[in-house]
Amino acid sequence: MGRAALPDHPSPEAGARPQGGLQTAVASLKLTNMYRLIQESGVTILTAGPSYTGLEEEALQEFGEVLLSEVSHATPPRFVIDMSETDFIGSSIIEILVRAWKRVKNRNGTMALCGLHPFCHEVLQISRLDTIWPICASRDQAMSAV
């Protein structure tokens, strides 16, 4: 299977909280240009964009809403969170990742992270979160892990 890109135009309900499904979430994400959401070979991939600082409350809330909606509804429940364009993570993003992982686990799904900058990787190692989901160097490795 190949990469399935989603439309670049926002839907009429783009300002509303995503209710599940890849297309609704992408419309919401495109408005902020902070995230990309695609499906490739049966894996949902959420990439945090370069403008993401990890400190903006509104951005964190949107990231959490989109990720939690997708892990609750996407089929199959296979997820990669690509952090290659993000150079900082804090406790709020860690909380969102743990909540997402719990939902994935409850659906008998899989989740992996990839592309972590050294500081971000170290934070996850210190918190021992690298023991509950795979942390991979590349997106291809993460896709193979899920």
Image (cartoon, rainbow, N blue to C red):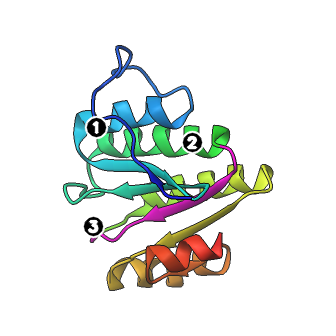
Q: Secondary structure at mark 2?
A: helix
Residue 34 covered by magenta stretch:
no
Task: Decide if residue 76 is in sight here.
Answer: yes
User: What residue is rendered at 56% in x and 33% in y?
Assistant: 21
| Vertical order, 5 against 105 (above or below) | above
Q: Which residue is mark 2?
A: 70
Residue at (40, 20) in percent of width and height: 16
Amino acid type of the residue that numbered disc 3 sits on in the rendered structure = Glu
Magenta extent: 75-87
- Asked whether the beta carbons under mark 3 and mark 2 sit within 8 Å of each other, the answer is no
N-terminal-most mark, 2 or 1 = 1
- Where is residue 30 shown, x and y percent of the image? 28, 37
Residue at the far front in the pictured view: 1
Element assignment for label 3:
loop
Residue pointed to by mark 3: 85
Label 1 sits on residue: 30
Tell which circle, 1 or 3, labels the residue nearer the N-terminal end: 1
Q: Secondary structure at mark 1?
A: helix
Label 2 neighbour load within 10 Å: few <14, some 14-19, many 20+: many
- The 10 Å Cα crowd at callout 3, few under 14, some 14 to 19, many 20 or more, is some
Majority secondary structure of the magenta segment? loop
| Location of residue 48 in the rendering, given as x and y in whole percent from the top left corner | 34, 57
Gap in angstroms between the C-alphas marked 3 and 2: 20 Å
Residue 90 location in percent, x, y?
Answer: 38, 64
Q: How many marks?
A: 3
Q: Residue at x 44, y 61 (%)?
A: 91
- Quarter the C terminus occupies: bottom right
Q: Quadrant of residue 29?
A: top left
